[in-house]
Amino acid sequence: MRITRNVAGTVFVGGALSMTIIALAYPAMLGVQNTSGSPSRVIANTRYGPLTEADRDFVVKVRAAGLWEYPVGQMALKKGTTKAARTAGEHLVSGHAGLDATCRKIAPELNITLPNQASPQQQGFVATLSSDTGKQFDSDMANILRVTHGQIFPAIAKIRATTRNTLVRQLADQANDTVLDHITVLEKTGLVNFDSVNFQQSTPPKLPQEQLTPPAPQPGAPVLVLSPPPNASSTSDGSGTSDGSGTSEDSGTSGGGVAPEVTPSPTVG
């Protein structure tokens, strides 16, 4: 199977996904700071255990992943040309709805502000897949997402092995199961080019910080909710009021945004 040059470039950009959280901006909002240069630096002592920079960054990273992979899952349900591609879409929507519920639940407990939009890099993935049709969509979806999931998988294991915060540990357990499930269903499409995927995962390019930074949420605005479908098996906290389109808004205090749409703006920025 051959990936087009444009798609290959987009997937190549995905190599930096594993570095996204370390490079996030607006530290006052999302709490990502590079002043110490040490992800293990304890930034808060909570009743759930110490919270490090890496712990906080991980929560934001899981949230940001859902902000682009959830709408891609919705696309797959509509545009997928095979049952396997549509099944992958179902798992993406359900899995990230469950992770989103957990992120929104623990963020206020840990004083973490969540983004409401994906990073420009991640929005670029959505833009590429939005413009795809037919079998090209199936192929691009399987390969782009297989690269990004393969990159975040080791990061989850590292957080799970090192965190001393029980809430972060629980999120890591859930994320590990979800990402493994997504990797499995993506591979079952039969479209994954493993040679290309392994190359992209092992040689991530360096991107400017602005490409890796989700836009800052508007203080006081509703928190975007990725609602599970009616037949979803993923666990959700049930917060927010569904608008019937798979999205809803939550009046929580973890940092809202201005746009209620799930699908990020299709620009690379």
Image (cartoon, helix red, strand yellow):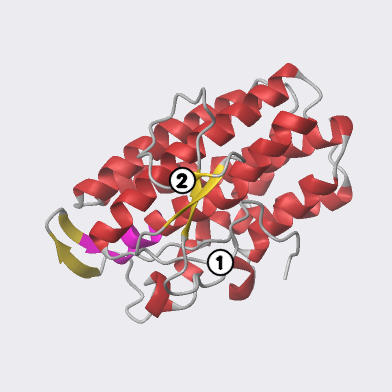
Q: Quadrant of the rendered structure where residue 52 is? A: bottom left
Q: Mark 2 highlights which residue?
A: 241
Give the side of residue 222 with respect to residue 144, left or right.
left
Residue 171 is one of the magenta-drawn residues:
no
Q: Identify the residue shown where x is 68% and y is 58%.
A: 123
Q: For marks 2 and 1, give the CA distance.
A: 24 Å
Q: Mark 1 highlights which residue?
A: 214
Identify which residue, 128 or 204, lies in the foreground: 128
Residue 52 is one of the magenta-drawn residues:
yes
Q: Identify the residue shown where x is 33% and y is 64%.
A: 112
Amino acid, disc 1: Pro
Q: Position of residue 157 (x, y in %)?
A: 37, 42
Relative height, residue 10 to residue 3 (above, below): below
Q: Quadrant of the rendered structure where residue 219 is? A: bottom left
Q: Identify the residue shown where x is 64% and y is 22%.
A: 87
Q: Is residue 251 visible?
A: yes
Q: Secondary structure at mark 1?
A: loop
Q: Position of residue 107 (x, y in %)?
A: 32, 57
> Which numbered disc, 2 or 1, marks the residue that appears first in the sequence?
1
Q: Identify the residue shown where x is 34% and y is 42%.
A: 172
Q: Residue furthest bottom?
A: 35
Q: Position of residue 214 (x, y in %)?
A: 56, 66
Q: How many marks?
A: 2
Q: Residue furthest left?
A: 47
- Magenta span main SS: helix
Image quarter where the N terminus lies is top right
Magenta-colored span: 51-58
Amino acid, disc 2: Thr
